[in-house]
Image (tube, helix red, strand yellow):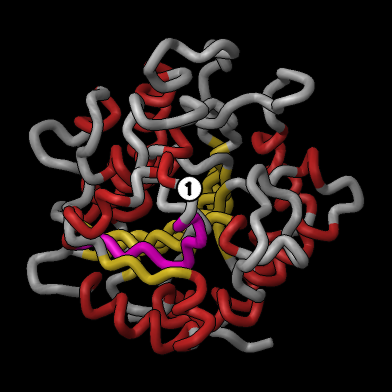
Amino acid sequence: MGVTSRGIALVGAPSSIGIRPYDESGLVREIYRAPALFRELELARRVSAADIGDVLPPPYVDFDRPPGGARNEAGVESYSRELGRRIAAATAVGEFVLLVGGECSIVLGALLGAREGSRGNVGLAYVDGHADFATPSESVTGSVASMCLALAVGRGDSPLARLAGDEPLVRSRDVALLGRRDESEAWYGNAALAELGILDVTADEVNRRGGSLVALAALERLTRPGLAGFWIHLDADVLDPAVMPAVDSPDPGGLSLDTVAELLVPLVHHPKALGLEITIYDPGLDPDGVCARRLAALLERVLAGGRS
């Protein structure tokens, strides 16, 4: 049963607590505005979703990074648990969740909720321009967004790596990292990816093989026996900055809108797909709203099955 034959529950995660403030002003990034802006674009109606509201984060505390640690760690932990409860409730009754963020740390709450709602281990398709695999001690910025995949697989000395108790939120062998282009940025923890057996398909390889074929390869991992389902993380920075400059790290060489759609459609419409989140789009960097409209159109296209 694909997403088109299931109910879709839209959840807003208006959070900026998992990412560093703007470099120049020191103010909180306006990523928290994204869910409201997507509602103005009538995203719920366009994808035939029931809007079940926002989960509000705690305030931003760590404008100055704790030495060697993660910014707003306690806040991200409590927010992840609250977000997880909302997602678990939707997942448990068979709804597909569209989680509109917010920054990348929301994947922790999403996985927590997906595990609880499906009552089993889950896989993770991590579609992102960066590995986000730093530990708190390795991260340059202290942003949980730079380390959330590492934390999800239990890597790093932080309570955020133990949200599910003795088990990680997702086992590394059940992760497909798709579309990164941060090979030259060692501070994202890239060296540990191969050691832990994560399926790692770079942006160059996605462009060479095509989104559909890469999705099929990922599904072999995400639908292994013993997995109750899988979650899909989409960071807007996987897109090339020519079409998506409104992100915190608009590095060149990303994917096109068409390629991302080709990659996502087979994942989203697989019967074991539990939900999709979108993160890192920053309305503060999109004064004319062009990027928001592009992302809303992409989500509509993907959830409609790839029809233009």
Q: Residue 307: name its quadrant.
A: bottom right
Tell me if 139 is positioned left or right of 19 in this view.
left
Residue 192 picture location, percent across and down: 25, 49
**In which quadrant is the C terminus drawn?**
bottom right
- Residue 181 among magenta residues: yes
Can residue 43 be seen in the rendering of this structure?
A: yes
Up the image or down, 9 lies above or below 144; here it is: below
Give the residue at mark 1. 185
Residue 216 picture location, percent across and down: 33, 85
Can residue 109 be seen in the rendering of this structure?
A: no
Residue 235 picture location, percent across and down: 54, 55
Q: Residue 221: name its quadrant.
A: bottom left
Highlighted range, magenta: 174-183
- Looking at the image, which residue is at 50% across and 14% down? 65
Q: Chief secondary structure of the magenta span?
A: strand
- Looking at the image, which residue is at 78% across and 58% down? 291
Mark 1 nearby-residue class (10 Å; few <14, some 14–19, many ≥20): few
Up the image or down, 51 lies above or below 242; here it is: above
Q: Nearer the viewer, residue 39 or 179?
A: 179
Up the image or down, 174 lies above or below 54; here it is: below
Q: Nearer the viewer, residue 255 or 276?
A: 255
Q: Secondary structure at mark 1?
A: loop
**In which quadrant is the N terminus drawn?**
bottom left
- Looking at the image, which residue is at 64% across and 59% down? 44
Q: Amino acid at mark 1?
A: Glu
Tell me if 1 is positioned left or right of 227 in this view.
right
